[in-house]
Amino acid sequence: MAIIVAGLIIAYVSFQRQTISLSAAGKYIHENNPSNFVEFFDNGTFHTRENLIDYYGTWTIEGEAISFHATVPMSSYSSGTIHGNTLVDPEGKKWIKQGN
């Protein structure tokens, strides 16, 4: 019985993480510079354009904390928090999710 309960708990937590990831997926536009954006895809990859430079890589989310690792054109890391439909970057700048 304990094994079944543990299995159900693991499945539930995995489902919750997947649901959070899917809800975070989407395109976010910088509130003060609409030519800058970041788009998180359902498959865990992202594309961002900042100051006319495109970056590509992977992202993960844990609760409200989102981390992303760019691999193209260079390796770099960034993070932020997701609050509803707003991404807040480490500098406190806001990126608003589109298509809500």
Image (cartoon, rainbow, N blue to C red):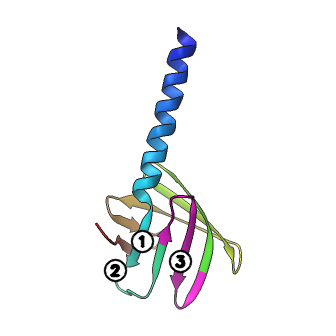
Against 2, residue 8 (above or below) is below
Q: Quadrant of residue 87?
A: bottom left
Q: Position of residue 73 (x, y in %)?
A: 69, 81
Q: Determine whether the residue tagged by mark 2 lies in a helix, strand or loop.
A: loop
- Residue nearest the viewer, comparing 50 with 14: 14
| Tag 3 residue | 48
Q: Distance between the Cα atoms at labels 1 and 3?
A: 9 Å
Quadrant containing the C terminus is: bottom left
What is the magenta segment's predominant secondary structure?
strand
In front: label 1 or label 2: 1
Q: Check disc 2: other Cα within 10 Å, few if <14, some if 14-19, many if 20+.
A: some
Against 70, residue 23 (above or below) is above
Amino acid type of the residue tagged 2 in the rendering: Glu
Q: Are marks 1 and 3 in contact (CB under 8 Å)?
A: no
Q: Distance between the Cα atoms at labels 2 and 3?
A: 15 Å
Q: Position of residue 51 (x, y in %)?
A: 52, 90
Task: Inspect the magenta stretch and tell me whether residue 48 lies in it.
Answer: yes
Q: Position of residue 96 (x, y in %)?
A: 34, 72
Task: Inspect the magenta stretch and tell me whether residue 42 lies in it.
Answer: yes
Q: Is residue 12 left or right of residue 85?
A: right
Against 16, residue 38 (above or below) is below
| Tag 1 residue | 27
| Tag 2 residue | 31
* Mark 2 / mark 3, whichever is N-terminal: 2
Q: Check disc 3: other Cα within 10 Å, few if <14, some if 14-19, many if 20+.
A: many
Residue drawn at the location 71% of the way across and 73% of the way down = 75
- Residue nearest the viewer, comparing 72 with 99: 99
Considering every residue shown, the one lying at the far bottom of the view is: 52
Amino acid type of the residue tagged 1 in the rendering: Lys
Residue drawn at the location 39% of the way across and 78% of the way down = 29
Amino acid type of the residue tagged 3 in the rendering: Thr
Badge number at residue 61 = none
